[in-house]
Image: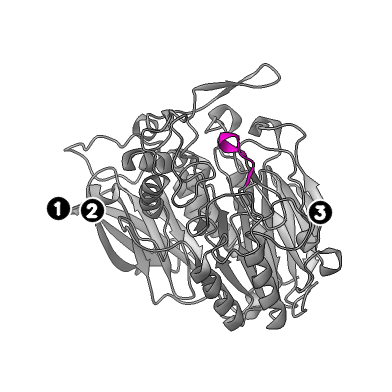
Amino acid sequence: MSHRPLPARRALLRGSLAASAALTLPTALGAAPAFARSGRPRADWGVQTGDVTRDGGLVWVRSDRPARMIVETSATESFRSPRRWYGPLLGPDTDLTGTTRLRGLPPGEQIHYRVLLADPDDPRRTGEPVTGTFRTVPVRRRDGVRFVWSGDLAGQGWGINPEFGGYRIFDAMARLEPDFFLFSGDTVYADGPLAATAALPDGRMWRNVTTEEKSKVAETLAEFRGTFRYNLLDENLRRFNARVPSVVQWDDHEVRNNWYPGQRISDTDTRYTEKSADVLAARARRAFGEYFPMSTLRPGAREGRVYRVLRQGPLLDVFVLDMRTYRNANSSGDQTVDPQGILGREQLEWLKRELARSRAVWKVIAADMPIGLVVPDTGEGRRNVEAVAQGDPGAPLGRELQIAELLRFVKHRRITGTVWLTADVHHTSAQHYQPSRAAFGDFEPFWEFVSGPLNAGAFPASALDGTFGPERVFVKAPTTSNVSPAGGYQFFGEVDIDGDNGELTVRLREQDGGVLFTRTLQPGLVGQ
């Protein structure tokens, strides 16, 4: 199997790992350090890259005080003859975060970068540089593509536990040396306060790193910012971010559990004084754009979108969906007409257009929720549908109508190489969808792979809905709810596309990297 040459990359990543390991834990365990009058700006929250292209990408940093962001790039770790990029002035309007867009870099090459933070009143006073590395998107098919995906980080009361090794699953993903990480939603749990301790079934105690912002549900912009900042206290994640670019999407827990546009929070939920989900979502969206480097959301911006397509060379296009912002209200899901669905009409038409014009061998549809797994919304005594499937194995109803329209389009346009990846349900599984088993048969067979959580409670396997004929070929899930990371059942997936023969191999892996399930798909086929 051909991929890019790895030995040199391993050596350079070891160097990057050593450099990023030098980052110190931010002051006061996540609270913004005081704006000291002496000293130089610090980047204690590390660096990230995101939405990398064939000639560049976005570099992210957060300062501990107002500073000018400067990025230097080089082909080597020695940074001989670096290229310099002047970024934004980091200030309170963006919670001291910022991104700098890099352009004009060579395709398919390993890029070393370092971020310097300069005193805005004296540009000669810069803080200690923080280094990272990434590979630009290749233009040659033979280079291949490898990436990992998962979701659901630090939910259900399970936060950073140093005694457990913190978010150690990120080290397991980093060892695979992926080109990027697809973060499939629930990147934070803004609705999930963390207590200092939690009892485990065997009598041991789970001990969380805690912060003021994580002591309650997030409502204010400051609280949402603190929620996103919390995860960056983990050194495993900071090391990972310095080595592996991200492709990020969101789902519900960036705002609150099972939210939808127009939702009013019940007066019985006394955790919230702000009762408008739209107000909470606007604040969460702003913090989300500040804490992740994304091409369609910028720090401090109140506009923009999460859905986008990222072209990863001749072998792969990644279609990042937003199944939260444009959905209709959660309901019983039995409507016979549902034009808005879970994507909204505009996003659905965008997705159809982009799939039709894609010339990539493989078209990964990054969905933040599964298609055929039943995910109920049982809040406030109602049993509504939270995802797509509503449990009726018959003809499409409710949000299933929109998915049926999309699957029909893919079939009749003879679009090959579609693979669905998702997280959300806190277990791992592989589903094969087959029209001969389905109530709705006007589509070609396809696969859906599920992974996660990353450091959150694990839950039993979801029920299947037979509308699109899914067969669960593999599943690993606990039999009880909210199993802690100490109990296992933490998962991520790997996708490896061979540069020689174009085969796409999916491996479902568990917390320390062990392979649970493998499936190899052949390129160029209509349905498989």
Q: Amino acid at mark 3?
A: Arg
Q: Provide the residue designation for mark 1.
A: 122
Q: Residue at x 59, y 46 (%)?
A: 171
Q: Quadrant of residue 58?
A: bottom left
Task: Give the numbered dot on residue 508.
Answer: none
- What whole-number distance in Å separates the C-alpha atoms at marks 2 and 1? 7 Å
- What whole-number distance in Å separates the C-alpha atoms at marks 1 and 3? 61 Å
Q: Amino acid at mark 1?
A: Asp
Q: Report the quarter where the N terminus lies.
A: bottom right
Q: Residue at x 54, y 30 (%)?
A: 162
Q: Provide the residue designation for mark 3.
A: 472
Q: Residue at x 49, y 52 (%)?
A: 241
Task: Give the numbered dot on residue 118.
Answer: 2
> In the rendered image of this protein, does residue 326 appear above or below residue 255?
below
Q: Residues within 10 Å of mark 2 (few under 14, many from 20)?
A: many
Q: Residues within 10 Å of mark 3 (few under 14, many from 20)?
A: some
- What whole-number distance in Å separates the C-alpha atoms at marks 3 and 2? 54 Å
Locate residue 466, reporting x and y percent.
79, 57
Locate residue 522, reporting x and y percent.
78, 74
Sequence-wise first label, 1 or 3? 1
Q: Quadrant of residue 23?
A: top left
First to last magenta residue range: 378-384
Locate residue 226, reporting x and y percent.
38, 39
Q: Out of 6 and 119, give the one closest to the viewer.
A: 119
Q: Residues within 10 Å of mark 1 (few under 14, many from 20)?
A: few
Q: Out of 112 and 194, give the one closest to the viewer.
A: 194
Residue 434 visible somewhere in the drawing: yes
Q: Is residue 149 left or right of residue 305?
A: right
Which label lies toward us, 1 or 3?
3
Q: Do labels 2 and 1 touch, CB within 8 Å?
A: yes
